[in-house]
Amino acid sequence: MTGDHYFTAEPSTAAAPREVEFSVAGRDYALRSAAGVFSAARLDPGTAVLLRKAELPAPDTTGALLDLGCGFGPISCVLASTAPAATVWAVDVNERARALTAANAERVGAADRVRAVAPDEVPADLSFAQLWSNPPIRIGKAELHELLRRWLPRLAPDGVAWLVVARHLGGDSLHGWLVEQGWRVDRHASQKGYRVLRVTR
């Protein structure tokens, strides 16, 4: 296999820095991105649907929030901006993605509340009030299921996970699989071929 993927731990592709601009909930964001991370050139359409259609945390939300597969950090930055009393754990296997997320958290004034870490750096006893993810479908179904089996149980008893999945990439089958695993799953919204799933215990 040649070339990097967004799930490559240490991308060898030249960074080619760029800036990605978008708006969520009336706030404008201008974040740094680079080659070798997920959706480097723009806010991914699925992520855009997720941030537009899911219920963003309330301003008084506290505790830990998880951005699973953070990329260059758009979800983390939005969560940190809308929930200033919460701590966001931005998890990604991609070293460059974590560095960008940390830099972007500083850009939005949330450097002290965003922890950009590798998966194994998350404290084992930490539970999450919310989990947000545009999960990496292209790693393969078995790997995706393993990823969700690892992280969904980290939700607090009253926690909620928000996932976005393209219908043509298996959004409906993932919905069914989650139900089989014992989760309560509501199709919260559908837009532009994407499913926004609300997952609870």
Image: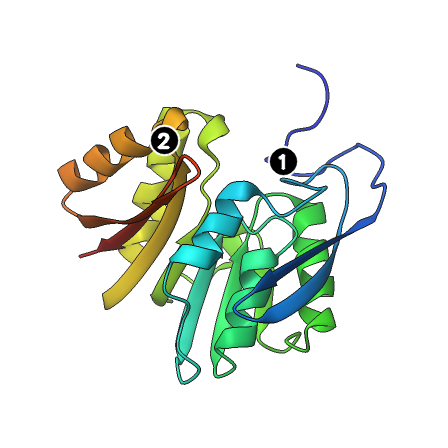
Q: Residues within 10 Å of mark 2 (few under 14, many from 20)?
A: some
Horizontal and vertical percent position of residue 15: 83, 41
Given this view, does label 1 or label 2 mark the residue nearer the observer? 2
Horizontal and vertical percent position of residue 82: 50, 75
Q: Residues within 10 Å of mark 1 (few under 14, many from 20)?
A: many
In the rendered view of the protein, which quadrant contains the N terminus?
A: top right
Q: Say which element carries label 2.
A: helix
Residue at the (74%, 63%) spot, across then down: 103
Residue toward you, 121 or 136: 136
Q: Amino acid at mark 1?
A: Tyr
Reading the image, the residue beneath label 1 is 6
Residue at the (48%, 36%) spot, across then down: 136
Disc with the residue nearer the chain's start (1 vs 2):
1
Q: CA distance from mark 1 to mark 2?
A: 21 Å
User: Is residue 145 left or right of 185 when viewed as pictured?
Assistant: right
Residue at the (47%, 57%) spot, across then down: 51
Q: Say which element carries label 1.
A: loop
- Asked if residue 125 can be seen in this view, the reply is no
Residue at the (67%, 41%) spot, across then down: 37
Residue toward you, 121 or 94: 94
User: Is residue 32 left or right of 190 when viewed as pictured?
Assistant: right
Residue toward you, 42 or 110: 42
In the rendered view of the protein, which quadrant contains the C terminus?
A: bottom left
Reading the image, the residue beneath label 2 is 167
Q: Amino acid at mark 2?
A: Arg
- Vertical comparison of 192 with 80: above or below: above
Number of marks drawn = 2
